[in-house]
Amino acid sequence: MKKIKNPLIRRIPKELIGDWKKYLVVFLFLVLTIGFVSGMYVANESMITSANEGVTKYKQEDGHFELKKQADATLLSAIETGEKADFKATKTTLYENFFRNEEEDYNNDGKKDGTIRVFAKTKDINLACMLQGSFPQKADEIAIDRMHADNVGIKVGDTVTVSGETYKVVGLLAYVNYSTLHEKTTDLMFDALKFDVAMVTQDGFDRLHKSIHYTYAWKYETEPADEAGEKTSSDNFMRALLTQVVVADNELEDYTPKYGNPAINFATDDMGSDKAMGGVLLDILVVIIAFIFAVTISNTIAKESSAIGTLRASGYTKGELVRHYLSMPVIVTLLAAIVGNILGYTVFKNIVVSMYYNSYSLPTYYTIWNPDAFFKTTVVPVILMLVVNLIVIVRMMQHTPLQFLRHDLKKTKNKKAMRLPGWSFFGRFRLRIMFQNVTNYLILFVGIFFIMVMLAMAVGMPDTLDYYKSNTDGMMFAKYQYVLKSYEDDDNKRITTENKDAEKFNMTSLVKKSDVLDEEISVYGIADNSNYVKIKKLSSLKKNEVYISTSFADKYGLTVGDTVSLDEKYENKSYKFKVAGFYDKSQSLALFMSIDNYGKVFDLKENEFSGFLSDSRITDIDEENIATTITIRDITKMADQLDHSMGSYMNYFQILCILLAAVMIYLLTKLIIEKNENAISMTKILGYENKEIASLYLLSTSIVVVIADLISVILGTLVMAAAWRMMLFSYSGWFTFRVTPIGYAKMFGFVLIGYLIVMVFDFQRIKKIPMDQALKNVE
């Protein structure tokens, strides 16, 4: 006997056609969200795989260190073998990886545009992927970082000036140890605008004049199995290195293992966090859409309760009806996931790749199939949609056929009607509408709150960057900080300057250790009655008393009277300082003490100092004696880079949030109007005009939207500020998340713009409800 086909199946396409606008909005919304997240997964996996393969292909270092003087063959051999260490040696192979930090003038106008770190071409360590052009062959040829070139408008064939010497750009490359252009390991953010890395020939390297940084890269003879093993090997190697360097009467200037090098790790870590964030974003949006579907289905079941009661009495099982009402949201989600994944592997993947290439110096990549992307953007959304709706539908189907026939679907007994205030008829009517749609409005509030968190980032990020860029002058105590290699030159003569603005100071870096990050803290010794760091009574402080920057206090929650414990970077030595006050003219994480106390704490020789503070450029000190010069560029580069990398995307993100708000509000207000179609039809019979009816229903929703909007602006900003603090705790440096009054107004206004768009459609929907609908549905 032929099995009779379930007639409920025929209802699915009819329902889809009958309410195609709603399903199209949901479908497009899911397609765009799933497509973008899928593209992010595919791009991430493809680019990270290429980067990981490049570790071997381009001979990436396991770490590097810098010495004050060039090491001879004997010292290098001793460091490699670790023979003088009093513990098990970690054997390595060392490679010269010398560089010069030169002045870059990329538009050849005679003014410094930034710093360019120049390496001589090598075949031994830290090779580069040539993305366009060729490697330099002549002394006047140079290959520069591709991302920096794109950012400042340099093309192959152009010329650039490097510390007065002219070079022809013959190639655009990506160094394997500079996937992000971090000038220093302590930089919170890379700088692809004012910092560049480049390759020249050995003859081209010899043309330059700045001091050589004697940096040596190492590779372990036995590669560590994991990061824990890498840290152990690094610690052992550093102890052996320190032993050999001291014996050779040299000094260790810098020590950076691979795991602690942001120029190597930042890009892949950031892409990994982007992937995780994208997955969470998708899951939250799908759950919100699932709840909207669930409320829709709940209303549909209530509206069709008589038909459901008849079907149940005719022999249809609960399972058949549950599967029927589940089919629509699952089908829409599944179709959206399929289309979204197709777009993810094509259009959106390319968009994400271009975003990453705009921020990171990555090698050439190839697309790979990512089953994780398919699972998280297809299987997970369908399961979430299925589970949320299944719970609601099964709960609704617990009623008996008789209860469905009688429309008796309430779990609780009818209570007496709530007594409303003695307002006007319209006021009480609107209040009643609000009480009748509490569930819908709660979901609306959750949706607006979630959108507001994203808006807080989209609006707050530019506000924060603008604040720090516009207040830079107030965050620097001197326009120039000249840090010397030593207070004496090669002839043991004290270094001096005729510049009248110059003021001696001392500075060193200590480490504040924590479970999250071992962070460098600058410690300054300031002259009495300083013209630059104006702290009263600094000279009267006790030996261990210090002022700290407000950024340091804010990040670690320090107050006056607290004790700060800091450690030497490369030695087993700790210091404890008592907080005597705060200094707000420094954006860096820093401590300030008198220059006399500094000498006592760090056991300096008499009149020993680290450098000069000055508001004008010092020109009478030999470049060979200057270790680094800190200028306003070092303060602004983080904000400039973030603004360049993310500024335009934040504008697009704001538009996306407006559209997202419109979609959420559209779906929920549509439910409210559908639920009240009979009442609206009855008010038309009683003679009320469309404008009056719209004022009843739309104004009620408008009041709820405005209240939810106001509350969400505050809560969304607080959530984003807390997330910002958590995020920055894993990075060196600090700046507080800020939203301006205009920014708050933008956040509030953007959601209202989305609602105003929806109001147009809602008014048209109310106009189309016929007067006879209430009469047709009388039972």
Image (spheres, rainbow, N blue to C red):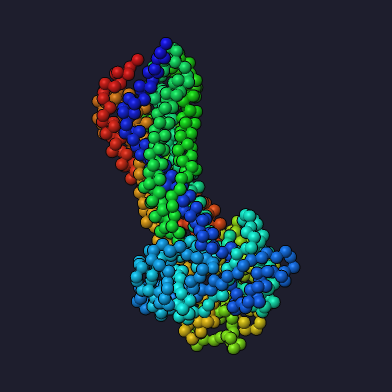
Q: Is residue 607 above or below residue 575?
A: below
Q: How many marks?
A: 0
Residue 351 in sight in this render: yes
User: Image check: 560 left or right of 772?
Assistant: right
Looking at the image, which residue is at 32% across and 25% down?
14
Q: Is residue 388 above or below residue 122?
A: above
User: Image check: 126 left or right of 563?
Assistant: left
Looking at the image, which residue is at 46% across and 30% down?
389
Q: Is residue 450 above or below residue 602?
A: above
Towards the viewer: 49 or 438? 49
Q: Position of residue 602 (x, y in %)?
A: 66, 75
Which quadrant, please, contains the N terminus? Answer: top left
User: Image check: 193 left or right of 553?
Assistant: left
Which quadrant, please, contains the C terminus? Answer: top left
Q: Position of residue 593 (x, y in %)?
A: 61, 73
Looking at the image, which residue is at 44% across and 21% down?
321
Q: Position of residue 689 (x, y in %)?
A: 25, 30
Looking at the image, which residue is at 35% across and 76% down?
108
Residue 704 in sight in this render: no
Towards the viewer: 678 or 297? 297
Towards the viewer: 282 or 215? 215
Rendering quarter of residue 33:
top left
Q: Position of residue 312 (x, y in %)?
A: 44, 15
The residue furthest right is 86
Rendering quarter of residue 83:
bottom right
Towards the viewer: 121 or 530? 121
Q: Is residue 456 above or below residue 306?
A: below
User: Image check: 779 left or right of 59?
Assistant: left
